[in-house]
C-alpha cells in the first residue's frame, strides 16, 4: 500500500542565527610567528552561561583548498551551534571544517567562522589550535596537535579524504561537504542544535532520540523508533539551508536497522523538492527491497514489478550500512550506492527503461532539493528501529 503525503513539509529552517552578544572581544590567540605561519584568532563574547566566538583562520604563506581547525577547551565549554563551518565537539576537543563555500583561502588571506555554546563557571581560553594538523600561533604542541599520537582520533587532512573509521569521532572523509555530522556535538537526549525533530505529516508513537549506546562513529547516533500503522512519522531534519547547494548533490549516511524491509511501503530518507510542489523525494523500501519514491505522484524507482524489485537489494539488518546517493537536478538523474556498490534498481539514467525507471520518467523530473530528513514513515503496519550516523551532503561524492 502506498499513500502519498497530504501536507507539505515545512522548508528547512535558516542557519543558526545568534542573538547579539555584547561585551568585549579579547583576542585570545597567541602571537604570530607560528609553525607554517598559520594564525588562528579566537575572539569570544562571553556572558554567564554562554558565549559566541568568531574564529579567524589565516594560513600564512600556504594557500588552502580545504581546512580543518582543531582546538581544545580546557574548561566546560560545549558547542551548540556554528556558522560558516561544520563544527563538532568530542569531549574537550573541537573540530571545525570548512563549509562548501569557504574552503579555499589564498596565501596571505583569511576566512572566518563562528561558534556558539554554553559554559559553566570555568571558561579558560582554548588552546592547541591546529590548521590541517599543523600547530598555529606558535603554540607548543599540545597533546591534540600531534596527529600520530593524538588521543583525539580525528584525521584532519581534508586533501587525503581518508575513509571513516567506525569507532572514531567525528566522521572523516567529508572533504568540503556542506553538511557533515556524526552527532557527536549532541548534548541532550533529543536531537537539537543542527537538527530538529519534525513530523511533517502527522504524529503518532514514533520517536527520535540521541543514542549513546549504539553509534557508527564516536559515542552518539540518532535513534529512530518507527512505529507501525499509518501516521507514525518522525524525522530529524537538518536545520541548515540546503537549498543553496546547487543542482548536483551527493549524500552519504550510515544506517543500521532491526527489521527487514517489509512488503509495505516505508520511508527512511525524505528531501523536500521545491520543483515538485515541495513534496518529498523519498528513499525507503517496498516489497522487501530499497526503493526511491516520489511523493507527488507515487512513482517508484525501480518499478514494483517482480523484475523491477529484483534489480534492487534489501537493506541488511543488524549492522551498519553505508548509503550514498547522487541527485542531479540539472539532468534529472539519480544514482545510489550501498556499501560502495552501485544499485541498478536505484538508478535513473535519464532514459526510461521498463521495470526500472520507466515510471520515474512518466514526466519531466528536475528536482530542486532543499532539505534532508532521516527517520521513518510507515504507510502500512511495518515498524522498525533505526540508527543514523555520519551524515554528509556535498557537491562531490563523499564516499563511505
Ligand atoms: Ca556518531
Image: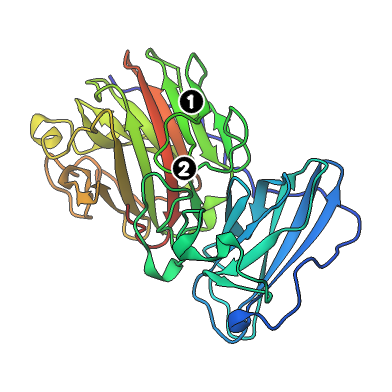
* Residue at left offset 36%, top offset 45%: 166
Closer to the camera in the image, 246 or 27: 27
**Which label's residue is closer to the chain start, 2 or 1?**
2
Q: Residues within 10 Å of mark 2 (few under 14, many from 20)?
A: many
Q: Does residue 334 appear left or right of residue 54 in this picture? A: left
The N terminus sits in image quarter: top left
Closer to the camera in the image, 15 or 147: 147
Residue 208: x %, y % from top left: 51, 26
Q: What element carries label 1?
A: strand
Is residue 225 positioned above or below 323 on the image?
above
* Residue at left offset 24%, top offset 24%: 260
Q: Is mark 2 on a helix, strand or loop?
A: loop
Residue 355: x %, y % from top left: 12, 39
Residue 43: x %, y % from top left: 78, 63
Is residue 240 positioned above or below 148 on the image?
above
Colour convention:
rainbow
Question: Mark 1 — residue?
Answer: 234
Q: Is mark 2 within 8 Å of ligand 1?
A: yes
Res. 98 visible in picture: no
Mark pair 2, 1: CA separation:
24 Å
Is residue 380 positioned above or below 86 on the image?
above
Q: How crowded is mark 1: few (under 14 residues within 10 Å), some or many (20 or more)?
A: many
Closer to the camera in the image, 227 or 129: 129
* Residue at left offset 43%, top offset 40%: 389
Question: Mark 2 — residue?
Answer: 218
Is residue 66 positioned above or below 365 on the image?
below
State yes or no: discs 2 and 1 in contact (Cβ < 8 Å): no
Q: Does residue 211 appear left or right of residue 267 in this picture? A: right
| The disc label shown at residue 309, or none | none
Amino acid at each position: 500500500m502506498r499513500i502519498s503525503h497530504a501536507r507539505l513539509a515545512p522548508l528547512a529552517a535558516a542557519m543558526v542565527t545568534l542573538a547579539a552578544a555584547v561585551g568585549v572581544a579579547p583576542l585570545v590567540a597567541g602571537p604570530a610567528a607560528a609553525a607554517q605561519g598559520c594564525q588562528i584568532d579566537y575572539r569570544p563574547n562571553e556572558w554567564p552561561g554562554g558565549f559566541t566566538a568568531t574564529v579567524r583562520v589565516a594560513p600564512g604563506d600556504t594557500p588552502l583548498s580545504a581546512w580543518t581547525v582543531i582546538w581544545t577547551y580546557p574548561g566546560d565549554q560545549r558547542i551548540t551551534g556554528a556558522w560558516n563551518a561544520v563544527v563538532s565537539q568530542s569531549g574537550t576537543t573541537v573540530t571545525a571544517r570548512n563549509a562548501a563555500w569557504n574552503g579555499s583561502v589564498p596565501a596571505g588571506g583569511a576566512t572566518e567562522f563562528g561558534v556558539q555554546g554554553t559554559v559553566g563557571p570555568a571558561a579558560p581560553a582554548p588552546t592547541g589550535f591546529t590548521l590541517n594538523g599543523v600547530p598555529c600561533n606558535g603554540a607548543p604542541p599540545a597533546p591534540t596537535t600531534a596527529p600520530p599520537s593524538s588521543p583525539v582520533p580525528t584525521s584532519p587532512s581534508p586533501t587525503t579524504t581518508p575513509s571513516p573509521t567506525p569507532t572514531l569521532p567525528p566522521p572523516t572523509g567529508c572533504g568540503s561537504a556542506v553538511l557533515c555530522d556524526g552527532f557527536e556535538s549532541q548534548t541532550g537526549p533529543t536531537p537539537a542544535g543542527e537538527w530538529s525533530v519534525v513530523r511533517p505529516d502527522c504524529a503518532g508513537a514514533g520517536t527520535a532520540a540521541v543514542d549513546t549506546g549504539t553509534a557508527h562513529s564516536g559515542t552518539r547516533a540518532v535513534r529512530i523508533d518507527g512505529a507501525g500503522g499509518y501516521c507514525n512519522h518522525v524525522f530529524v531534519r537538518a536545520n541548515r539551508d540546503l537549498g543553496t547547494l546547487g543542482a548536483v548533490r551527493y549524500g552519504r549516511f550510515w544506517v543500521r536497522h532491526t527489521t527487514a524491509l517489509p512488503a509495505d511501503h516505508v520511508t527512511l530518507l525524505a528531501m523536500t523538492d521545491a520543483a515538485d510542489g515541495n513534496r518529498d523525494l523519498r528513499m525507503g523500501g517496498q516489497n522487501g527491497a530499497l526503493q526511491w519514491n516520489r511523493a507527488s505522484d507515487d512513482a517508484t524507482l525501480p518499478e514494483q514489478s517482480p523484475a523491477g524489485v529484483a534489480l534492487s537489494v534489501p537493506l541488511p539488518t543488524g549492522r551498519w550500512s553505508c548509503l550514498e546517493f547522487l541527485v542531479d537536478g540539472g539532468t534529472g538523474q539519480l544514482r545510489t550506492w550501498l556499501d560502495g556498490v552501485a544499485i541498478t534498481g536505484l538508478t535513473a539514467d535519464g532514459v526510461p527503461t521498463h521495470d526500472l525507471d520507466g515510471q520515474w520518467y512518466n514526466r519531466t523530473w528536475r528536482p530542486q532539493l532543499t532539505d534532508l530528513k532521516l527517520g521513518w514513515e510507515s504507510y502500512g503496519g511495518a515498524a522498525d528501529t533505526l540508527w543514523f550516523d555520519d551524515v554528509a551532503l556535498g557537491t562531490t561524492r563523499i564516499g563511505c
